Amino acid sequence: MACARPALMLAALLAAPAWAASLDVAWWRDGKVEVRQLRQGGAPPPPFDGARQVPLASLWKLFVYVYASDNKVAMPDYRCGGRDPEEVYCCDAGQSITHDVALAQSCGLFFSPKRLMITNAPWRTYWTGRLGGAPAGDFAWLADPALLTPARRVRLDSLLRALASIPAASRQDAEAALLRVVLDGRAGRGADTARWFGSQLRVKTYSWHEAGGRIGGAAGWLADGTPVWFGGAGGSSNVFEQWAPKLAASLPPVGAADDGGCVVVDYFQRYPIRAVRGERGIAAPGPLNGRYHVRFENGQNLALRSNGELMLVQDKGGRPQLRGRFGVNEYVARVLDREANANEPEAAKALAIAARTYLQQNAVTVAGCQQIADSSATQRVSPSPATPAALAIARWTDQLIVDGVTVRYHSTTPSEGTMAWSEAVRQARKGKHYDELLAAAYPGGALSTFGNTGARCQRLSQNEDWLARSMPRWRRVLQREAGYEAPAQAPLVCALQSGAPYSEQSRNRIYMRPLATREDRITLAHEYLHLGLRNHPRGQDEEYVEQLARRLVDLNLEAI
């Protein structure tokens, strides 16, 4: 969970979280709305269907983003001047924010139609084309960009149908930006929930105040393009924190999405091939379709299958060579099949992400494709089609990589920056999740997506040293605090680029600025307590945590 000091947040966020007894979930599939209601005790909530009126809230920004991206509208960075309170969602005074980060962080000032010079006529023409008719009736809210106000109420089914009208090519940039919601502590109100969703949820969060109190949730798409919406009591971060496991389990099965990217694999680089024989004899150069036997110069034989993705070519000396061409997920799944297996899902997810990262870090780009050898010196790739289990793991982790460190792995031997498959399996069987396995193997890295470097940890050594010196003095106080569990390893303290300081439990990290004042030291103690009280309800009591943090810093002053 990502937590921020209350002294640096809006007053509305100082109140204790409003925990919802139920969560409403809806999606659009096969031309109709499907709904679910998740419960945690209490009286049954009122039923609902697609006719329900829901607040547009922050979701208007997603529609502006899609329109601007699809129509190549210039989206210059927004620079924060420090005078507008709404900039708390954007950046610090003097800093700037880009369009992708602005969408994930819900920076409304960035997406102002007036700022982006979005006018009514082209806007209306665009949505008329998307919806198959002029936006009127239930779609009247899309008739004019000026109508996209947070207080605007829209029919739930019209919201989902509008999301469904956006084709995959137009969703691509938005989905990539929205993956930050479950990955980045600063950017995403759903931070630390990638454990449950992988890369399957690409949603824009929203929070809104109504007569009954604060509500929050998100809307967007699943990885296969299924439009989805959910909402409940509390802000969006509270909803994610409370409901992530149950929500992930309740969402519809995600169909196979297009396998993006292109990977060319040069097979058997260390084992010269003598001949490739198919059902009709020696195979001729060209695409391979069917079952084949590969005979190597060392006398060994290998059976394989190909559906046209393998190509038999000849090198300059006339020797046969095998080359494969795959989407990235097919490639990752074949690595998983060859290097390990998918029998232990959490370990398999960690290895799939490591394999995808290794590809990004080591492949060369040739004619628009990533090219890499199949070799024990790099990573081995199955020459036969990926098993369904391995392909499901690769798709669930689609686009996810470890950012900020060089990634390696080994079957049995762990070392610095190297994950051991056998150890990952052992820890997974003890209940560890894939993100915890990655954090243990690559402590300097962060779960991210290719091209998203916002999750890198620029370590603050001065802050870490101060914390290391302080923890022994704090121990006698903290041992008497109910629910306190010292983190197994000292947290990493990472430089915060913008916004309020926060902690991330799954990564055992604290994001803040360099120590300069007493308040900075209290901030560091405060975020450390969120980590130490991660498994106890008092860890979410901001007033208690703040008071205890000040007490701990005063202990340091007494020691001096």
Image: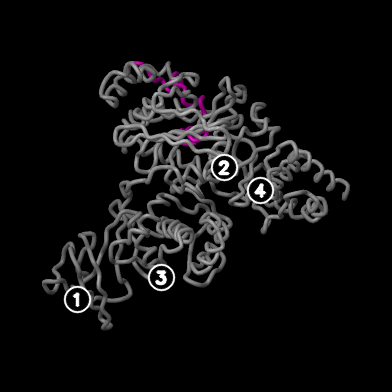
Q: Which residue: 44% across, 51% down?
A: 400
Vertical side of 238 occupied by 474: above or below: below
- Please say whether residue 96 is visible from this viewpoint: no
The secondary structure type at the circle numbered 1 is strand
Residue on which the image places disc 1: 275
Q: Which residue: 64% across, 52% down?
A: 492
Mark earlier in primary sequence (4, 3): 3
Which of the numbered marks, if any, corresponds to residue 377?
A: 3
Q: In this view of the protein, which residue sits in the foreground, 230 or 513?
A: 230
Q: Which residue: 51% across, 35% down?
A: 23
Mark earlier in primary sequence (2, 4): 2
Residue on which the image places disc 4: 534
Kind of residue sitting beneath label 4: Arg
The secondary structure type at the circle numbered 4 is loop
Q: Nearer the viewer, mark 2 or mark 3?
A: 2
Whole-number angstrom distance, CA of label 4 to CA of label 1: 59 Å
> Is 110 covered by the magenta stretch?
yes
Mark earlier in primary sequence (1, 2): 2
Whole-number angstrom distance, CA of label 4 to CA of label 3: 41 Å
* Position in image of residue 385 (x %, y %): 28, 62
Whole-number angstrom distance, CA of label 2 to CA of label 4: 15 Å
Q: Which residue: 52% across, 62% down?
A: 428
Question: Around disc 3, counting alpha carbons within 10 Å, would you say few (fewer than 14), some (14 to 19), or many (20 or more)?
Answer: few
**Which residues make up the magenta segment?**
97-120
Whether residues under marks 2 and 4 lie with C-beta atoms below 8 angstroms apart, the answer is no
Residue on which the image places disc 2: 185
* Position in image of residue 512 (x %, y %): 65, 42
Whole-number angstrom distance, CA of label 1 to CA of label 3: 24 Å
Q: Nearer the viewer, mark 1 or mark 2?
A: 2
